[in-house]
Amino acid sequence: MSYIRMIPSAVAASVIAWGGAAQADLSAEAVWQSWQEYVATSGQQMEAAGETRDASALVVEDVAISGMIEEASLSLMIDRITFDEQSDGTVLVTMSDSYTMRLVGATDETVLIGVSHPSMRLIASEIADGISYNLRAPEFEMEVLEFTGEDAPEELDVAVRLSGVTGSYAIPHDPDGETSVTLEARAADLVMRVLDEWTDLDAFYSVSGARMALTGQALAQMEDDPAAALRAGFALESSFGFDTARYSFDMEEWGSRSEVSGSSSDGAMRFVLNSDEIAFSFSSRNGELNASGDEIPFPSVSLTTRETGFGVALPLSARPEPQDVSLSLRVVDATVSDDVWDFADPGGALTRGPATIILDLVGAALLENDLFSEEAAMMAMMAGPEALGELQSLTLNQLLVRFAGAELTGEGAFTFDFDDFDTIPGVPRPQGVLELALRGGNTLLDSLVSIGAVADDEAMGARMMLALFTRPGDAPDELLSTIEVREDGAVLANGQRLQ
């Protein structure tokens, strides 16, 4: 659906219209001039049909913004913008409560979007290396008013509504300097309705206590050559958080209907991109998901989690020394509804307690080329992703898997010698120790056999394999294992050599 891909362009356009315009001076004329210059750095043009000086205020009328946002052309008209010099040396900026913008895609698809922010106020004040803006808007709304084009659906309603919006901007005089933005909203809602020949969709997403922060440097350089932009100083760090979130999704497609709804709290998301690393993480608590539909073999499915999280960080630039890498996953106390258990285990043989998966890995990698460079892309194409760099070390800080009464824990650390592919043919020589503990494993295996999920001969093979790598622990149904790889390539399990 190409019309969905045009929505981010509309959001970017609104930022240019009311949020991104900055770099104000202490006079009204300088503020207006800086707005035009700043919009120009984004490849847009900003012009007014008339300018009038009224005492301490400069009033500009019929302000037109035009240009390209990604692959779409943008045009919008703001009836009136007032720049009013205040007695404390700041500049108060107000504008028309509402206006419309038009986006035309590469295939002549046209979206008309209404923007409304009654009583919004921007106050500009001078700081050491630029201009600081304070923003306050009781309400802010963007809504699709019209959509036309060959791929236009029969019906498309998309609206973003925020209330109690406050925030600040710090934008430098130097276009390549650091820009920072913080925004908070008491509540934020996204409502979507799509109807076409094969799809009928209703979606809703709502958060309370939304928070967003962004800092960036040399943002104008991030165009067609990301590697060059990163080397030139491009940097971006953003975060998003919320107190509570609710969502629902109701869709009928090709005659099959599905419904999904859920909620979570204490959400946090972070993204970092600079010449040193790319990192992404998210977490939330008290998650709840409910689903039903024609493809589900029982009336509904419910899933709850006490905590969820994911994080990954990778180096981007070649360095002579190894750089940090990390990967983490947390799904704590996940439970599913009895309908799912009854379907998989009608006799109740399995323990139906909460399930948990925790994985925490850190390491060090040596990059031979910048990860975004043409050289790296060519090497990955010819020799695979492993040609991009060398994983010098890997540490398992924590492994925890808890399911159906069984629990697996582990920790360990290994180094890898990429100058030695002979000790273990074709593999960089590893060296290190891995400690594992399995509790309740045999009991779980017996239960799986009893419900027919595992055959008797498969269970026997699994127990024989465990006997090779494990030793009994002190507790009932506890198996321990110490896997060691020595410098000479010897592989030992609990002191017994396997290779």
Image (cartoon, rainbow, N blue to C red):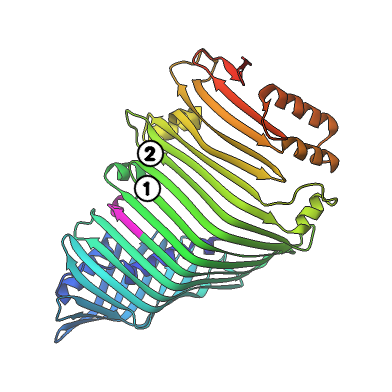
- Quadrant of residue 230 in the image? top left
Q: Do the residues labelled 2 and 1 touch (CB within 8 Å)?
A: yes
- Residue drawn at the location 45% of the way across and 49% of the way down: 280
- Of 187 and 355, which appears nearest the observer? 355
- Quadrant of residue 490 in the image? top right
Circle 2 residues within 10 Å: few <14, some 14–19, many ≥20: many
**Position in image of residue 410 (x %, y %):** 58, 35
Report whether 255 appears left or right of 414.
right
The kind of secondary structure element at disc 1 is strand
- Residue drawn at the location 63% of the way across and 33% of the way down: 437
Task: Identify the residue position indicated by label 2 in the image.
Answer: 316
**Position in image of residue 270 (x %, y %):** 42, 54
> Going by the picture, which residue comes out furthest to the front?
474
Circle 1 residues within 10 Å: few <14, some 14–19, many ≥20: many
Q: Is residue 429 above or below residue 38?
A: above
Q: Earlier in the sequence, mark 2 or mark 1?
A: 1
**Position in image of residue 46 (x %, y %):** 27, 70
Task: Identify the residue position indicated by label 1 in the image.
Answer: 273
- Of 117 and 329, which appears nearest the observer? 329
Q: Which quarter of the rendering shows the N terminus?
A: bottom right
The kind of secondary structure element at disc 2 is loop
Q: Residue type at mark 1?
A: Leu
Q: Which quarter of the rendering shows the C terminus?
A: top right
Residues drawn in magenta:
214-221
Report whether 122 appears left or right of 474.
left
Q: Residue type at mark 2?
A: Leu
219 inside magenta stretch: yes
456 inside magenta stretch: no
Q: Is residue 214 above or below residue 82?
A: above
- Residue drawn at the location 32% of the way across and 49% of the way down: 235
